[in-house]
Amino acid sequence: MSAVVELFGHSAEKKRKDWVQIVREQQCTFLGKKCYKVRKSDPDTSIGSCTVLYGKQQEPIIICPTRLIERRQIFTDCFHLLTTHEPGNEFHIVPEVSIPGGSVDYFLVSAKKGKVKDFVGIELQTLDTTGTVWPERQRLLKKLDVPRTDKGEKSEKSYGMNWKMTAKTILIQMHHKIQTFEHVHKKLVLVVQDKLLAYMSREFNFAHLRNPAVIGDSMHWHSYGMEKQPDKSFKLVMHSRLSTDAEGIGTCLGLQAEARVELEQIIQALQGKLSPSTLFVPV
């Protein structure tokens, strides 16, 4: 198996005749548009590496957050946290909303006649890499008989997984943001791969987290695994759900929380972004 497991959302193991077209078009299958991860030395070339193998890990490690929105399942799995949603309301997925404490990747919104009735914040976190995956990507293209823009496959440069920094950074971010959500009695969900959650559970104080999750808690973890399908593609499947509150996040890090915001600020930011393009339509 190639070190690069998925390229532009397609399994490298799956036999197909259109690899040349896939690489030329550089389309992310999850976003439906060009992959936004480009080479610094060549901004016109998208890297497209979604998942990789590393070390003793025999299952794919997700290195691109966009990989997590496959089939929009992560949004469906948050519907139950919209505790004041009512039948007849519309669902919206609103990306990149700034709030005190930082920007939130997505908001799942329940709206009626353009007015926000409820919302859940959703953060995505995958593993950051060190070094470069480019040589492995180019080796895959060579294996697939796809023309390459350089001879990167000859490079001896390698890549690693930044487990510690990734885990610590996202916990600190959650520590800042959960205060905002708890203050306005709403939920924040962190979506991660099961392997990253397992690392966080070993390296930080997670003993107090509720497993399975309790709907009344303000902070939720949804972890997903990569399940191999008969056709050699991979499917994102929920692995576990944990939960805690703002105090619990502080316990994870040994910190005290200190952020506050009014509910109206978030509602105004969300309502200004609701549009036909944000309307949730199941795939």
Image: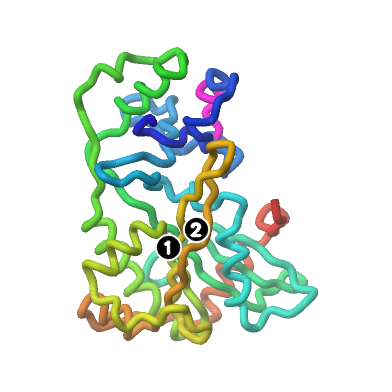
The residue at 33%/73% (across/down) is 176
Q: Secondary structure at mark 1?
A: strand
- Tell me which segment is drawn in magenta: 22-27
Dot label at residue 103: 1
Rendering coords of residue 166 (x, y %): 28, 56
Secondary element under disc 2, as helix, strand or loop, is: strand
Relative horizontal placement of residue 183, taking residue 176 as reference (left or right): right
Placement of 41 over or under 129, stated as above or below: above
In the drawing, does residue 266 fall left or right of residue 128? right
Determine which quarter of the picture holds residue 76.
bottom right
Q: How is the image coloured?
A: rainbow
State yes or no: discs 1 and 2 in contact (Cβ < 8 Å): yes
Q: Nearer the viewer, residue 143 or 33?
A: 143
- Residue at the spot of label 2: 96
Question: Residue drawn 37% across and 71% down?
Answer: 101
The percent coordinates of residue 200 (x first, y second) are 28, 65
Q: CA distance from mark 1 to mark 2?
A: 6 Å
